[in-house]
Image (cartoon, helix red, strand yellow):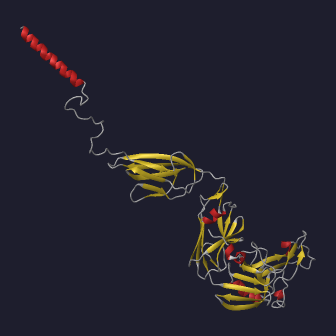
Amino acid sequence: MRRRTIFATAVGAASATLLTACSGDPGPAVWGDSPSPSDPAEPGAAPLPRPAAATFEPENGTNNVAPLKPVVVTAVTGTIKEVSVRADGKSVRGSLDAAGTTWTSSGVLAYGKSYRVTATIVDADGAAVEQSSTFSTLKPASTATVTFQANALTSMKNGGTYGVGQVIIARFSKAPSDRRAALRAIEVTSTPSVEGRWYWVDNRTAHYRPQKYWAKGTKITAGAKIRGVDLGKGVYGAADNSVSITIGPARIAIANDKTHYMRVLVDGVQVKNMPISMGKPGGTNTADGGRVLFPTRSGTHVVMTRELEHQMTSSSYGVTNPKDPDYYDALIKLCCRISYSGEFVHSAPGSVGDQGKRNVSHGCINISPSNAQWFYDNFRLGDVVVVEHTGRQQQIGDSAGAVWDVPWAKMITV
């Protein structure tokens, strides 16, 4: 009995020693166990799939975003199924690339709006995840529009036909302080293609022309993409605008003060040589103490308006006394205006005896009733009237054609 008890005690002590050693072993806690799902993957195991996700540009919470800045949603993982960009119930257009990973807006953003961007991204298993972002656009101090004019008296007609001397006039509703940005936002294209340049005639008006007159049949399109464009000092473009015109036959009249005749060429061929009487020498004092000169201004003019009748009066330039020998108030027929100051090519039956001999008008080009009828029937807006040798040169702003007299080297390229 005693010997058996000692043996059993020895075996129990050995077992206790073995268990104590196992519990302090830095190896596996229990023989035969495997890593739990939360443990790092074993070397060579496939990585776990990441959930679908996307990035947004502008970033979430961005303020004062420029309206021309595109909205871009890019899938970091997965592919894009749908993107919505909305403000005040209106959506912004956009498109998804072929890979389905990048969506880019194509519509211009509105000023001073809060936009919400919502994107649906799909992972490799087809599970959809929705993400969203918000941003706001800048609110400009003011906005400006641009219109295209044939001259300061009339807008350019889309689809209209004009003469070879027609300039493209861009008129801004507010003076752009960044003139370069303003002109770079306007693209003028022509078929056949020809180089053109700009010239600012005042702080709101720029004229565009080629080096030489347009060729007959030229197609011209002027497009102002100014919406969202920073024009300087807090002024931004309000809306885009465009116009397309065609150039008609080359009709050019050349009024020579030395010969008192006006040659008329159509497509390079002389078809008329009319006796004329232009502005007489000297001038007169006006009621307000100023002085007005009568010689017709030399330089390149273009027809700006056509009127069957026009009431002409010396009161328009300050001669208001009916007893003044230079006072007049008369209804004149068959009038083609060539300057803003009131120079016309018109019918003048009263000066027929002087036409071809001397100047007796107050600045207009007088021609006979029959020649005036022909001129009125054939000449259109943009057709050229060149005045030569009067000794009085027109200035920029005197007529819509004066920019043709500006040296090409002084014109602006953008």
In the displayed structure, 96 sits above or below 265; it is above
Where residue 286 sits in the image (x, y, percent)? 89, 72
Where residue 337 sits in the image (x, y, percent)? 75, 78
Residue sitting farthest toward the top: 2
Residue sitting farthest toward the right: 323
Where residue 276 sits in the image (x, y, percent)? 79, 88
| Number of on-image labels | 0
In the displayed structure, 128 sits above or below 26; it is below
- Position of the N terminus, as image quadrant, is top left
Q: Splitting the image into 4 quarters, where does residue 325 fall?
A: bottom right
Question: In the picture provided, is 154 more to the left or to the right than 53?
Answer: right
- Position of the C terminus, as image quadrant, is bottom right
In the displayed structure, 82 sits above or below 283; it is above
| Residue at (68, 91) in percent of width and height | 270
Judge whether residue 304 can be spotted in this image: no
Where residue 34 sits in the image (x, y, percent)? 23, 34
| Residue at (45, 55) in percent of width and height | 103
Please state which of residues 78 and 81 is positioned toward the viewer in this rendering.
Answer: 78
